[in-house]
Amino acid sequence: MSRRRPQPPPSPSGEAGPDSRLLALFRDYGARVYGLARRCGLDPEEAEDGVQEVFLKVQRRIDTFRGEARLSTWLYQVALHTLLDHRRRVSRQTRPVPLGVLADETGEIAARAPGEGPEEAAAIEERRRLVRAALDRLPRKFREVLILRELEGLSYRDIARILGVAQGTVESRIFRGRARLGRELRRLREDLE
Amino acid sequence: MSACRRWQDRLGAWFDGEVSPLEAAEVRAHLIDCPGCRAQVAAWRRQREDLGLLQPGPVPDGLVERMALRFEAGLAAEVRGLDRALRLWTAAAAVLLLAGLGLLLAGRNGLLPREVAASPPRDLDRAVSEILNRPEPAPAEASEGRR
Ligand SMILES: [Zn+2]
């Protein structure tokens, strides 16, 4: 959230109507929210749906945005909550592909380094799916701090603001989350062998 | 060989770049002496690499614009939908009023209309079924079929 200076929403008293304010917000933060959606485990198509859902919620709740809270913090709160819910819903609907079966349905394979052979790519994809599965098994309170810290790169202070908890709580959740994730990864790797 | 309990908080904060330069120097000095804490840090590093695999590629060109257009269209549709729902409601309420009046008159004549409205909203549904479920009129008068 400190990577980019958030722009305050245009004043409601200007000629711009609420819709154009919202659209400006969408253009400023859409990519950010999309990235968060992908990091929460949504595939590209689901992430697009997730983004729509987030901004519809923003539209309905824009009046609850308190000026003193930073806009990006507030947006993160709404987005994280909505996207993790969305993820839970879609993963309940779709049958999980068993680990060990290779599929690039996550779209994350696009991040593959150039010059990688197909076998290496397959191994990396397998590892990626394992990590995603392990992360999915964590209780939400651990999953969200790890996503915000390790994937969004946010500071303890920013995470604490977003989650509305003390910084010490964030610290201990990250610590315990790492331990849990390590255990889940070991368990999944053993199951595969 | 496990990490020292009393160092764990600081170790974690250091790993996340959340300590002062002085504390960082202390942690580094401890790491030189302590294989247990080094192993902990190594495990966190591996996990960070693992998690890095979940990092999505860059947002495709034009995606935000496309999503914004979809969002705009959705907003417009929502407004239109609301408008239509309102008009439908008004129309349905009028139908119910007329139907109620009809029922009243029909009741007097011992006749009940077969259909009140095609697909009225929920509250209307309830009102209609309430009317239809009223006790049967006297058998002689109710021959004209009621469903
Ligand atoms: Zn130690």
Image (cartoon, rainbow, N blue to C red):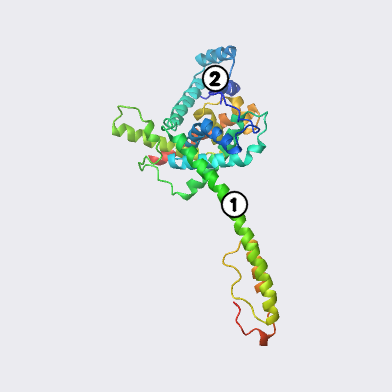
Q: Position of residue B7 (x, y in %)?
A: 58, 21
Neighbour tally class for label 2: few under 14, some 14-19, many 20 plus, Cα within 10 Å: few
Q: Check mark 2 vs ligand 1: CB closer than 8 Å? yes or no.
A: no
Q: Chain of mark 1?
A: B
- State the image quarter where residue A144 is shown: top right
Residue at x 55%, y 12% (from the top left corner): B25
Chain bearing tag 2 is B
Where in the image, quadrant-wise, is ligand 1 located? top right
Horizontal placement of B123 versus B12: left or right? right
Q: Residue B115, how many percent across, how many down? A: 59, 72
Q: Is residue B22 above or below residue B110?
A: above
Most foreground residue, B90 or A121: B90
Left or right of A67: which side holds B22? Answer: left
Secondary structure found at label 1 = helix
**Looking at the image, which is closer to me, A35 or B73?**
B73
Identify the residue shown where x is 47% and y is 24%.
Answer: B45
| Residue located beneath label 2 in the image | B17
Q: Position of residue A169 (x, y in %)?
A: 63, 30
Around disc 1, counting alpha carbons within 10 Å, would you say few (fewer than 14), some (14 to 19), or many (20 or more)?
Answer: few
Secondary structure of the residue carrying numbered label 2: loop
Residue receiving disc 1: B83
Where's the N terminus of chain A, which quadrant? Answer: top right
Write down the quadrant of residue A17 in the picture. Answer: top right
- Of the numbered discs 1 and 2, the one sitting upstream in the chain is 2
Q: Amino acid at mark 1?
A: Asp
Residue B125 lies, with reference to residue A163, above or below; the image says below
Residue A41 seen: no
Mark 1–mark 2 Cα distance, whole angstroms, equals: 53 Å
